[in-house]
Amino acid sequence: DDHDHDHDRGALLSSIARTVRKLNPSHVVVDVDLLDRHHDYASELRNKLQTTNNNDDDDDDDDENNTSTLIDVVEIMDDGLLIPFDKVPKALGRSRQGGRALRWSTFLSNTMKMQKENDVDFDKPIWEISSLPPPMHTMDDDVVSNNVLSTTTTSSSSMMMIPRIETFPTWAKQLLSDWGDINEEEAILRATSITITTTGDKTRTASVASSLAEKGSENTKLSPYLRWGVISPQRASKAGVRTRDLLWRDWSRVSYGLLNSLRRGDAVLEFMDRSCRRRFDSPRSELNDSNNDNNNNSSNMSEQGTTSTSEDELFNLWCVGNTGSHLVDAGMRQLWNEGWMPRRIRLLSAACLVEGLGIDWKRGRDWFERTLVDHDAAINEVMWQNAGLCGVDPFYSGIAWEAPPNGWEEEEYAEKWIGSGFSGSGEGSGEGSLAVWPSYLKTWATKVPPLQIVDGAESRREVLRAKGVYKAARTIGNAGVRVAWKGLANNNSATNNSVEEGEVMGVGFVPVHELRI
């Protein structure tokens, strides 16, 4: 929709300007998101208002409302970014080939450099709230028994009554009970749980990195509180949350806001979109060479240890955490029980589905959207496109998702969710065995997963490696994806035609029409 609206925004803004002129307010507040800010819609509206002021329509008989009063356009934006939006272009840098190159390592290093040189300030003012609306009332027992929502009138307002957790279905009740308090105090407690106070007024941050999180990160389960605005990234940073982790959120949102394909849900790099797909219509599951017209490596290599298991069957086994990979299975069962899993386990689970099982990354994206309590459209889309090796930064290609738990933390994690001994077959005895699955998934939670899923993991990687898929993924991460940017040269070097803003121009020095595996 954003893509279609761009063509009509001039006419739309002109219509808005005429309406504003008739209303004749002193101020117009424009609430913008990241994409609106990038296209500078507020300035365009300001210009349209000036134009309508100087050229009143001849057929407008309402002379009282035709006034030369200057209307002030005020732009407001809270994009949830740690880095101020006006610093984003500098953080991204420019490409000599036109447009801007979206490259995570460049964005990270430039932002950290700006912070070191005091060119960027991560602090935002914390406003003191003098009063809040009254809280919503909890349902009375008689209301619950009648299974209806009603309102109760107070002296000040009419408020919707909310049900108690005890009245929810088993799955929802369990999920909400596991999270406990959802408020600012709890968010701050999670964010500061890694900070140790020393003598005097000095504090230092303890190094308590978790092997379940990304390397160097802590496992505070703070992401839902950030996602729903219970705590800001600025306050989280001040409390001690690793800056790199917060900047990854920024990077995902910036990429999502600037790349049309991400917002459409289409692969950023089409030539890589089906590079990991199996052929499930064949007795021997081959890589789907026939669906990749840009692939010059049509080696027609078959998988080792293939199985007749269908794509839907493999997907269902993955959903319920029944693949035979201990960490993946533990993560998928935690996901259904708590609506959350650590970042590293998310990466392993995604690699299992895409590289291991050869299933379309979009199915994993949609499952995470359904199940995550911290679901963020930008972060989820970027992560899954990267897992599909067709996104802006497919850095984690070729990771050993089937590797057994390593160290006490991973062993305890696996034991908690899939039971003692990590049998990897059936429901097990861990907390994951208590999951209340949808009816269509119940039988898959107790099946014994095919041995080929784990045993064939390395042979799958060998096939992808031989076809040049991993090499292409590394090139994308190292060179960066060039995107057409407003106000910059955006011509296609081959056709000299202008590339529409937000569309991919190429990878590094290679134009988009020449990209192939």
Image (spheres, helix red, strand yellow):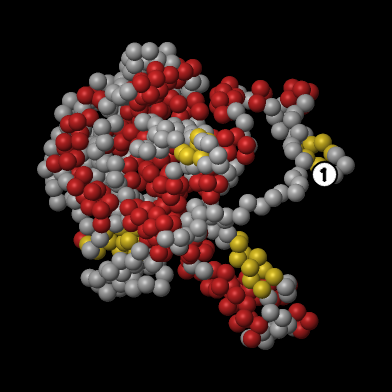
In the rendered image, residue 183, in percent from the top left (x then y), is placed at 63, 37
In the rendered image, residue 393, in percent from the top left (x then y), is placed at 32, 49
Q: Residue at x 47, y 39 (%)?
A: 204
To which residue does mark 1 refer? 157
Q: In this view, does 488 lie to the left or right of 191?
A: left
User: For the residue marked with disc 1, what is the amino acid?
Assistant: Ser
- Residue 498: quadrant of the picture: bottom left
Q: In this view, does 499 lie above or below 363?
A: below
In the rendered image, residue 509, in percent from the top left (x then y), is placed at 23, 63
Decide which of 65, 380 is in the foreground and name it: 380
Q: Is residue 480 above or below residue 24?
A: above
- Residue 504: quadrant of the picture: bottom left
Q: Residues within 10 Å of mark 1 (few under 14, many from 20)?
A: few
Q: Which residue is drawn at 29% across and 57% down?
A: 480
Considering every residue shown, the one lying at the far left of the view is 299
Does residue 364 appear anywhere in the picture?
no
Does residue 127 appear anywhere in the picture?
yes
Q: Is residue 415 above or below residue 265?
A: above
